[in-house]
Image: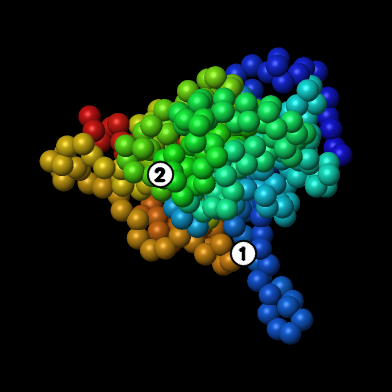
Amino acid sequence: MNMIHTGHTRNELSAGEPLIRAENVKVHFPVTSGFLKRPVRHIKAVDGVTLAIRAGETLSLVGESGCGKTTFGQALVRVLEPTDGRILYRKDGETVDLSHLTPIEMRPYRADIRMIFQDPFASLNPRRRVVDIIAEPLRNFGVTDQAEVESRVADLMRRVGLRPEYMARYPYAFSGGERQRIGIARALSVRPKIVVADECVSALDVSIQAQTLNLLQDLQEEFDLTYLFISHDLGVVEYISDRVAVMYAGRVVELATTDQLFSRPRHPYTAALLASVPRPDPRLARSQKRMRLKGEVADPANRPVGCAFHPRCPFATDLCRTEDPAAKDVNGTQVACHHAENLDLKGVTENAA
């Protein structure tokens, strides 16, 4: 187990310090062929992501379907095994590399890093009562007294807005929004430090989305939570995030504060995503020239040479087609684009002005 002393404990970490950091994380899936199932190529779902999540913040990860968001989130909680890279987690004055721990070594950290899954209908076992669903992590981490289990489950249900007297019911008796609250209660049952929320409101009606987002923010303050919020819905992301990372073809292409990213995007892909955000005034929307994406997301099994976005980018040059851009700082935004300093890209705030 690789541990490095940092000189202070988790309680001494100030808001804004990295609580967990991914360094050059890769998740590659082999594609096999023939009788011997030999790998002939790899799907590079996550291909070198470096990302630090600060204590107490909500960092959102956005991008089109297939860009690697969910795979990265699952690698962070070790649902999937990283192919390469490091996942550095700070706990009790030490930094631990989670990426190479055995399942037994990883067990003490599973209570600290939990996940809320996308589909509240698929993520709950229909054959188990709600009390058993929420209590499963508690029992896994040593809470065995039935009276204590039921007391803690009742308290969690109250905190997420569910009636404790319904704990003996099965998931089919609850609406989609209520099921997602059950999933949130399950994730919080062992008092985690980090919660990875994977598209956790995308399956809900708009009114229920708002209630769930407000609940997540209230719980963040109450439990001192740090969120990695994975979503494709930029309206939701703008509402809940402190910072936003934009993924394309398995890599982060832009990272900025929410205000910076929405008002002044630096990467053409980010600008194209923002152009899809609905405008409140239809007349204004018609009057603006909107950048539209053409083509499909780059194939993670056959990544284009140079910048992966260049086949779809209206600003691509020969440099973009031959050389992969490294991330650089442009006025406080981390961006992987050769021409970021010279592009005049429109953001939502600017368009709406």
The residue that mark 2 highlights is 175
Disc 1 is placed on an element classified as: strand
Q: Position of residue 240 (x, y in %)?
A: 43, 30
Discs 1/2, front: 2
- Seen in the image, is 119 located left or right of residue 224? left
Residue occupying the far bottom of the picture: 35
Disc 2 is placed on an element classified as: loop
Q: What amino acid type should be assigned to the residue bearing mark 2?
A: Ser
The answer to whether any part of residue 65 appears in the image is: yes
The residue that mark 1 highlights is 43
Distance between the alpha carbons at the discs numbered 1 and 2? 37 Å
- The quadrant the C terminus occupies is top left
Q: Position of residue 183 (x, y in %)?
A: 54, 40
Which residue lies at the image location 59% right of the left edge and 38% below the top edge?
131
| Number of numbered callouts drawn | 2
- The quadrant the N terminus occupies is top right
Q: What amino acid type should be assigned to the residue bearing mark 1?
A: Ile
Between 227 and 182, the one nearer to me in the picture: 182
Give the label on residue 259, or none. none
Which image quadrant is residue 11 in?
top right
User: Does residue 22 lie above or below 172 as drawn?
Assistant: above
Which residue lies at the image location 41% right of the left edge and 40% below the top edge?
177
Which residue lies at the image location 77% right of the left edge and 17% below the top edge?
8
Between 345 and 6, the one nearer to me in the picture: 6
Residue occupying the far left of the picture: 283
- Seen in the image, is 320 located left or right of residue 288? right
Pointer 2 local density, CA inside 10 Å: few below 14, some 14–19, many at least 20: few
- How was the colour assigned to the protein in this rendering? rainbow
Which image quadrant is residue 346 in?
top left
User: Does residue 64 lie above or below 261 as drawn?
Assistant: below
Residues at badges 1 and 2 in contact (C-beta under 8 Å)?
no
Q: Position of residue 114 (x, y in %)?
A: 63, 38
